[in-house]
Amino acid sequence: MTSKEYMEQGDQYLLHTYNRFKIVLEKGDGVSLYDVDGKRYLDFAAGIAVFAFGYNNKEYNDAIKAQVDKLIHTSNLYYNVPAVEAAKKVCETTGLDRVFFTNSGTEAIEGALKLAKKYAYNRDGVADHEIIAMEHSFHGRSIGALSVTGNAHYQDPFKPLVSGIRFAKFNDLESVKAQITPKTCAIILETVQGEGGIYPADPEFLEGVRKLCDEHDIVMILDEIQCGMGRTGNMLAYEEYGIKPDVVTVAKALGCGIPVGAFVANEKVGNAMVPGDHGTTYGGNPLACAAVCEVFRLFETTDILTHVKETAKYLEAQLNSLVDKYDFITARRGKGLMQGLVVTKPVGEIVSKAIGNGLLIISAGSDVLRFVPPLIITKEDIDEMMSLLTKTLDSFQ
Ligand SMILES: *Cc1c(COP(=O)(O)O)cnc(C)c1O
């Protein structure tokens, strides 16, 4: 079939929840993707911050193939080798104690919210607790995760959502304080807001939230589904802030393409859940966890975090030069290889044009160009990105 035919068939049979860009991707290699016509794209989206080690990574592919031949699935009624190994890695890396594997980021959020509620229920002997979430946050599309996602456009058609959710302003500690009541059981926030427009938390804000949670015995949930797993130059973005959440959620780069997420809790909070409180058929299956183990092995053997820190400095400098050069680019924000450029021209049109020029970038919020490339990108890749992007931006002058 031609790409046009694939797109027609896709539009006929796929539910129309996305306005997809007009390309049909077929294969990938390193930081390049290829469509069915053989056209190459430089990928600064990484499947939305997923493919940290690039496409067609031989070691990663071999690890998955080996697991396919051994055991793909067993359910959580039994132990399996990759899940046990992956659990140890996740706990050691996050500095937390107990992990529950899920199939997606959204499900990791669901689990984290349930865990906080159960913790408060055990403590107080009653349910009906409240959760504080942030404006402009993004935590997923299921009813629970959507309930803590501070985006009216995403929420409104699906109301009523979960009750007892109060919204505060990100990076505004007083607004968080104002939402605390005796019923508050959790505060959930992203260490770096992704979907909402690439806003890193201010250190004083994150420290302040940590302190409030300690003072009121509130469960602090950090959503690092996008900013975690090396993206900011640390394994977890919160490391740089010198604080630790009670619960962290990870997904996206956790499996680098095999769908898997996790919520991870400290012992105090994690022990609130007992057999029967939560479950999943697929979550943490041997195939997904073999991917997780291989991802951690790649982090351990490649010194990628140093690479991310170095390349990020270069990327920041290049993006800053665009703020100086174009009137319609007003700011750069971000941490590590999670960067955004604020634009005053239609962001969707810029992304489309860039794709036409062979560069995959994505948007965040209503006015941000988002750069979340594979962590293995080099300075040469950044130079190529800059030339494709400049060509794109010039056409909007
Ligand atoms: C992507 C994302 C989610 C949802 O993850 P899915 O795997 O799409 O369900 C939740 N929180 C953040 C911060 C994300 O970036």
Image: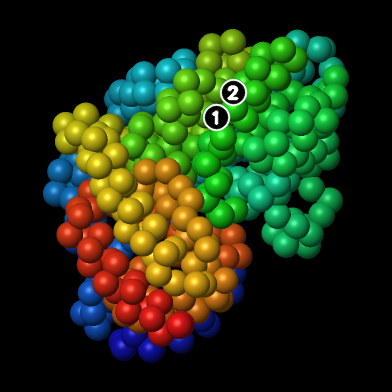
Give the percent coordinates (x, y) of residue 238.
47, 29
Give the percent coordinates (x, y) of residue 301.
16, 31
Identified by mark 1, the residue type is Pro
Kindly identify the residue that appears in the image at 23 percent across and 53 percent down. Answer: 377
Residue 77 seen anywhere in this rendered image of the structure: no
Report which quarter residue 397 is drawn in. bottom left
Give the percent coordinates (x, y) of residue 381.
21, 60
| Quadrant of the frame with the N terminus | bottom left
Q: CB under 8 Å between callouts 1 and 2?
A: yes
Taking the image as shown, residue 264 lies to the left or right of residue 70, namely: right
Kindly identify the residue that appears in the image at 36 percent across and 19 percent down. Answer: 92
Count of marks overlaid on the render? 2
Taking the image as shown, residue 63 lies to the left or right of residue 80, namely: left
SS for callout 2: helix
Mark 1 to mark 2 CA distance (whole Å): 6 Å
Kindly identify the residue that appears in the image at 83 percent across and 30 percent down. Answer: 178
> Quick one: label 1, few (<14), some, or many (20+) residues within 10 Å?
some
Q: Is residue 51 above or below residue 356?
A: above
Identified by mark 2, the residue type is Glu
Taking the image as shown, residue 60 lies to the left or right of residue 12, namely: left
**Foreground pick, 205 / 358:** 205
Label 1 sits on residue: 203
Q: Is residue 114 above or below residue 36?
A: above
Label 2 sits on residue: 207
* The label number, if any, that marks residue 307 in the structure image: none
Q: Is residue 122 above or below residue 49?
A: above
Kindly identify the residue that appears in the image at 32 percent across and 58 percent down. Answer: 318
